[in-house]
Image (cartoon, grey):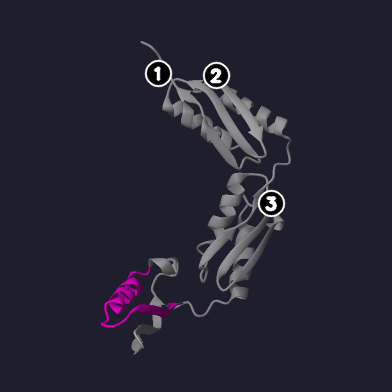
């Protein structure tokens, strides 16, 4: 790595080889140290960081390579409807578009591609769109509450609007409250859960 001074500006250039292909560039401690050192050069008022991150032992990974790997990876993910997801790769950044029925499918798609070699980051723009109506989703959640032996389903009220689910009511423990929220997240099409359930311990 080299360094040069130009009119009060310290410029560093060179290549930094990355030993771990799964770590993002922001986590490179040595690069941060190099920049900190440059900032202390006498007379320097600005630092231009030209260090380039290269993956050791993996060769160059083009956007086309990453795209093919991402498509293949999603195809093997049984939890993800890969045919409904569009993948775009630009300078190592992967953008996911499309729609799915469940929140966990959106999260699974991102998790599947974020560790691929050459990927710098993921923009997850997948939209969760339930095929069931709001009334059907509400009925699904209420039925799931009744199946949970540890929940007093009669004391929980469910409201749904534009993919947002609101839980209201009163339960006797924080464990019940958390269980109610986890159950709600499992419903199709839910993109946000607002848990307004209050906890009132049982009187002994």
Queried whether the magenta region covers residue 91, the answer comes back as no
CA gap, disc 2 to disc 1? 14 Å
Residue ID at (52%, 80%): 60
Q: Which is nearer the N-term, disc 2 or disc 3?
A: 3
Residue drawn at 73 percent across, 37 percent down: 132
Q: Which residues are magenta?
A: 28-55
Give the residue drawn at x 43%, y 28%. 175
Mark linked to residue 155: 2
Residue bearing mark 1: 201
- Residue 113 seen from this side: no
- Mark 1 secondary-structure assignment: loop
Disc 3 or 1, which lies upstream in sequence? 3
Placement of the N terminus among the 4 image quadrants: bottom left
Residue at the spot 54% in from the left edge and 76% down from the top edge: 61
Pointers 2 and 1 in contact (CB under 8 A)? Answer: no
**Left-right relation of 183 to 176:** right
Q: Which mark is residue 99?
A: 3
Quarter in which the C terminus is drawn: top left
Q: Around disc 2, counting alpha carbons within 10 Å, would you say few (fewer than 14), some (14 to 19), or many (20 or more)?
A: few
| In this rendering, position of residue 56 left or right of residue 70 | left
Tag 2–tag 3 contact (CB < 8 Å): no
Circle 1 crowding by C-alpha within 10 Å: few under 14, some 14–19, many from 20: few
């Amino acid at each position: 790595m080299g360094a040069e001074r130009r009119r009060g500006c310290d410029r560093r250039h060179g290549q930094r080889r990355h030993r771990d292909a799964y770590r993002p560039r922001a986590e490179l401690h040595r690069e941060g140290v190099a920049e900190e050192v440059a900032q202390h050069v006498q007379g320097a008022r600005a630092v231009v960081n030209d260090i380039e991150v290269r993956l050791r032992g993996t060769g160059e990974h083009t956007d086309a390579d990453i795209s093919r790997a991402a498509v293949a990876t999603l195809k093997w993910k049984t939890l993800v409807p890969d045919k409904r997801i569009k993948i775009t790769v630009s300078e190592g950044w992967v953008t996911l578009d499309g729609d799915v029925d469940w929140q966990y499918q959106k999260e699974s798609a991102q998790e599947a591609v974020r560790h691929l070699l050459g990927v710098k980051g993921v923009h997850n723009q997948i939209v969760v769109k339930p095929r069931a109506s709001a009334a059907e989703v509400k009925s699904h959640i209420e039925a799931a509450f009744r199946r949970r032996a540890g929940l007093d389903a009669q004391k929980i009220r469910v409201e749904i609007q534009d993919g947002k689910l609101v839980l209201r009511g009163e339960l006797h423990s924080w464990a019940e409250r958390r269980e109610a929220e986890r159950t709600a997240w499992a419903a199709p099409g839910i993109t946000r859960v607002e848990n307004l359930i209050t906890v009132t311990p049982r009187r002994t």
